Amino acid sequence: MIENALKGNRLYWIWIALLLLVIVFGISAFSQQLRLGLSVTGLGEGVPWGISAMQFTFMAAVASVSVLVVLPSYLHDYKPFGNIVVIAQFLGASASAIALLSLFIDTGKPQLLLGLLRYATPFSPYSWAFFLLNGYVLINLVTGWATLGAERKGVPVAAWVKPLIYLSIPWAIALPVVTGFVFTPFSGNQWIASLLVFRLLASAFAAGTAVLLLIILILQRTTGFDAGTKVSDKLVLLVAYAGSLTFALIGVECFSRSQTSPLLWLSLLFGIVSLAVFFVPAWKSSTRWLMTASAGVIFSLWAEKGALLLYSSTGGMVAYTPTLKEVSMTLGVLAIGILFLTILLKAVVVVKRAD
Amino acid sequence: MNEERREFIKKTSIGFLAGIGVSSGLFLNFLLEKTDASLWSDKNIAGTTRWGMLIDMRKCIDGCQKCVDACRLAHNVPDFGNATHQIAWLQKSPYREVFPTSGEDFAGKERTGKSVPSLCNHCADPPCASACPTQATFKRFDGIVALDYHRCTGCRSCMASCPYGAISFNWKEPRPAIKAINDIYPTREMGVVEKCNFCSERLLKGKLPACVESCPEKTLTFGNLNDPKSEIRLLLEKNQTMQRKPELGTLPSVFYII
Ligand code: SF4
Ligand code: SF4
């Protein structure tokens, strides 16, 4: 199935070339970082983490979306989602891979990361995140590939896939929470901290469904693969619900802290404006509006991660400007993940178009 | 036939797994490292050691940097001369930065106007050690929170979880920025963290920490917090002292008299 990645129209090849270009820039920046240390980034005293860590938390959260689709279709036999199960699984795999790579480029000694296999402890959120992400890439790739294979042959999915799907449920719930905890050991106000778990979960589902919706709409436009209105309606509903809860919780934090990070205000503002589209019938029936609004929700939840990470213990946020090299590296990692996803989705579209 | 094949696969896979385990040192590690649990001393248990320090700010001279310099010298701590990439095990900072939550907002200059030496508190319940994914930061039997520079992956989880900002990261290659390299203590590499080790290498030889020894005013007192007859315990008994951010429950082993 994978050989289909080598066939495609002009648009496809332009897209691949673009991704490769971004990856090359990223690799060149990373090789400089290996030589000169993390001093090539905008990080420093009081700012241990930056955009790469933001990408890590965001993508780990997005990855958990696969469960929202896989669960209803496998366990509750909800038919319409059957159409996009594979897409959600591959998105889960690629997003976790991006998260892992973002972690990789953000360590001082990436060559020692495998030491985690030996010395990991259950007390360290970072250990958890590392293991959960690795496992999630595997689970999603294996179940996704099995689903796709079955679909191609027109047979039901093999029985051994189901236990793996069950296994992925606690995984998907743990991922956004654990990765969020890596960065929030002392986030000040205690009762806000207690709301954090819910916010991490809600925002993960909102971000994940928004990304999935965006991907499906893009596929619809570029490849003619149509998931059906029932699917996109459901996803719109999910973004609307998860998004409302998320922005309510972000609102609570914005209005109850004396000094809220400006990024969180930005997130709230963008979020509410974008979310409105998901509620107004006339707007949500337009693909263009939906795409823009999904992008808005995604941006807003990126900013939310930023507020979480660039939190300063004295209130407000720390002074941090990412450098060009840092941006190249982060985008490079993103491009690697998108390339991976593109190749997987290419196989999906070909199989779907065949039946 | 099928049975045999299954048996074969089972055996080879067990062998394979064992091979991985041995080659990664998993089993060896397990056999060699024995810890005497009774030596762990979170609480003040007589007979065990919990090193601690008392800093008497009544004696400390403003503007004096002797302890800071002694520390830099003793441990090959680089000096980059810029705030972003700076590395410090021990430093002197304004009172309000060291005690942001002490509630002394309206106290007079004589108490809060001085810059205060600050270092790793060697907390009895250190959040940095639990955050570390490789146990490169760990608590020793004598209460010292130590660091294994060879195991650190440079993930900076410890930095973010230390509420005192006591850990520094080597953003650059440190060696060129060390003024005079000594061969008593190893230098570090780019990409790992470092922090105060309570001069564990000197304690081993029966010496006091370099900062304690270097202070002409005897501002710093070092000793075993679990020994009721130690000098530090007697001073703690007689004086009103404070710790940094005690409300966080990290149980610092460094105390201050202001
Ligand atoms: S002061 Fe910071 S680095 Fe030192 S033991 Fe406490 S938490 Fe860890
Ligand atoms: S930076 Fe090093 S010592 Fe600190 S948590 Fe990461 S691996 Fe542990």
Image (tube, rainbow, N blue to C red):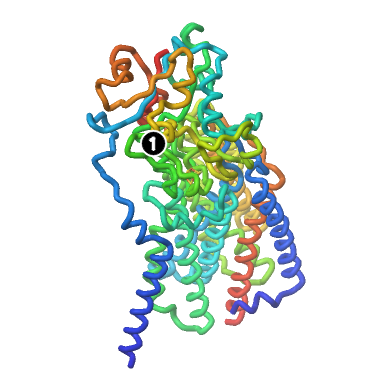
Taking the image as shown, residue A33 lies to the left or right of residue A94, namely: right
**Is A189 in front, or is B202?**
B202
Q: Residue furthest bottom?
A: B1
Q: How many marks?
A: 1
Whether A121 is drawn above or below A76: the answer is above
For mark 1, name the chain.
B
Q: Is residue A211 visible?
A: yes
The x, y position of residue A168, in whole percent, is: 41, 63
**Residue wearing tag 1:** B126
Q: Is mark 1 within 8 Å of ligand 1?
A: yes
Q: Secondary structure at mark 1?
A: loop
Q: Image quadrant for the C terminus of chain A?
A: bottom right
The x, y position of residue A15, in whole percent, is: 72, 65
Whether A278 is drawn above or below A90: the answer is above
The x, y position of residue A271, in whole percent, is: 58, 44
**Residue at the image point whose x is 62% and y is 34% from the top:** B178
**Residue at the image point whose x is 40% and y is 68% from the top:** A164
**Residue at the image point whose x is 56% and y is 24% from the top:** B69
**Residue at the image point whose x is 65% and y is 63% from the top:** A218
Residue type, numbered disc 1: Pro
- Location of residue B124 by image quarter: top left
**Is A352 in front, or is B64?**
B64
Taking the image as shown, residue A248 lies to the left or right of residue A21, namely: left
The x, y position of residue A248, in whole percent, is: 48, 40
